[in-house]
Each structure stands twice: as C-alpha cells, then as structure tokens.
Amino acid sequence: MDKKTKKGLGRGIDSLIPSDFDKDLVFKNDEKIRKILIKKIIPTDNQPRSKFDQASIQELADSIKVFGILIPLVVSPLKDDNFQIIAGERRWRAAKMIGLKEVPVIVRSFKESEKIEVALIENVQRVDLSPLEQAIALYRLHEEFSLSSEEIARKIGKAVSTVSNLIRLLKLPDYAKKSLLQNLISEAHARSILALNDYPEQQKILHNLIIKEGWSVRQAERFVVSCKKEGYNQVKELKKRIAIESNETKKIAAKLKTKVFVKRTAKGGKLEIIFKNDDQLKEIIKIIL
C-alpha cells in the first residue's frame, strides 16, 4: 500500500489484519480455487496502488516462501487465454519475486466482482449485522477489491476510524470473537480486550470478568489501564482492587461533584473519592462534615 493510502490509519489497513486470518471467512466454499501459471496473469491498468513498497513486497515474499499464498488472487479471464488481476497484485509480485510458476486464483468476471462489491457494501450498512461480521465484510472489500481505508469509509458512509476499529476486531482471540458473535460482550468491551493483546493471560481474565461478573465497559477500561501501569504480575491484585460503580457511588459522586468508586479487596474494600487539587479537597471535606 502506498504512503498516501497508509495515512488514514498510520501503518495502513494491512497492519490491522492478523497473519493467520482464516481465508474460509473471506471466500465462500462454492468458489473454486484454481492454480494458474503466473506468466498468464497480468496486472490491471486500474490498480489504485500506483506505487508498491519493495520492502513490504520482500516481506510478503519471505512469508510466501514459508507458508505459501494463504489467500488466492482474484482474476478475470481475457480473450487471449490470459487473466487480469482484480485483487492480489502484491501477492502476484511477491510470487514472481521468488520464482513461483503457479499461483492459486479464483476466476470471476468483472461484472461478478462488481455485484459482490455492491452486496458487501450493503451488508456492512445493515443494522442487524454483528461488529465481527461487519469486520469480515470490510476485510473482503480491502482484500478482493484493493480498496484503501479511505475508499471503504467513503463507500459505506462511515468514518475512517470506524473502519479501522471494526477491522481490528479480527485480531481478537478466538474465544472473544465467539463471545462477540453471541452478543455476550459488546464491541466496546472487545476493544478493551484487544488492548491487552500483548498480555494474553490478563486478556483472558478480563474476558471472563466481563462475562461472569457483568463488568461494564468503564470497568474493563480501568482494568486495562491499571494492568499496563502496574505490570504483568499484579493482575490478581488488580482484579480485587478494580473500581466498581453502583447507584450509591453515583449519588455520592453527584453530591460531592467528583468521581467516587468502591474498590474491593480480599476483605471488604475502600471508598475512593477523587479530587484534582487542595481547593476541591477542602470543598469535599466541607460537604462531608
């Protein structure tokens, strides 16, 4: 993806996709995958990427050497028994770089691809589609039609940040994906779980606390902040001390005009009253006394 395309999401939409993404989620089982000689495949004149980062192509080539081409190219037949790339030019270039003779492809006409693109756009806009299902549809728009994040956002009428946040859901661990599909956790909960991708143990604990103890999004966010701040080995203590909001604490907070939390410990707990400066502390003390 060129520099211009990357701008909207920092590192670009490719960086949001897990390397072990299941291609069966993208391509339907009835779409036949064929092997075609790479010399019979030509790039399209309408490729939105005018420049290709050779370093990223080399990285992809190195990956293909080890794992092969995980997701097939999408091509359209031409009259001269050749095929034109609809999607997957980076994979085609990487395959040529390492001297592959054949590549896996799915053959579609341009009209078929246009219909699929329209259907995907309509699907993303459906209100009954789960966030994870939307993420898969967005990924297909990127992967099969070489659309940048900005182009996808414009086509579906959503902000670029919304597109990036949805696609990041594909990096959730499998158990969290399942919970999201079953509506056991919300998209906001899922983003908190994602924030702990570098801490798989804490990530699993947070997921269980949301499911079993009904933690709110705010509680989940505080857990993430505390976990990152206090370190890997503090997770058990964090579970005990994480702030809990209730109707009672909300009433106290309204009266004191500040945030109030209950923090549970192994035995009992403590009431935490937040103040920004000494003047606010004096006002709180006046109200209490």
Image: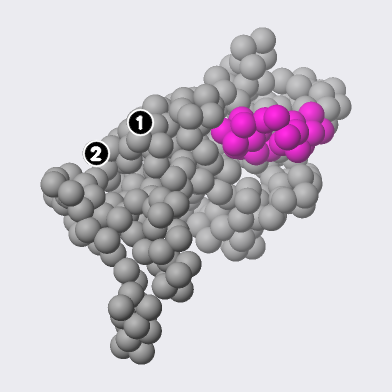
Q: What residue does disc 1 label? A: 212
Residue 206 in picture, x, y percent from top left: 33, 40
What residue appears at the point 30 percent right and 47 percent down from the top-left corner? Answer: 198
Task: Give residue 44's quadrant in the image.
Answer: top right
Name the residue nearer the viewer: 262 or 198. 262
Q: What residue does disc 2 label? A: 201
What residue appears at the point 53 percent right and 29 percent down from the top-left corner? Answer: 183
| Image position of 169 with respect to 178: above or below | below
What's the amino acid at mark 2? Glu
Residue 248 in picture, x, y percent from top left: 40, 54
Specify start and end residues of the magenta stretch as a single range. 117-141
Residue 39 in picture, x, y percent from top left: 63, 28
Point out the tag, 2 or 1, that comes first from the N-terminus: 2
Is 26 placed left or right of 63 in the picture?
A: right
Coloring basis for residues:
one colour
For the C terminus, give its image quadrant.
Answer: bottom left
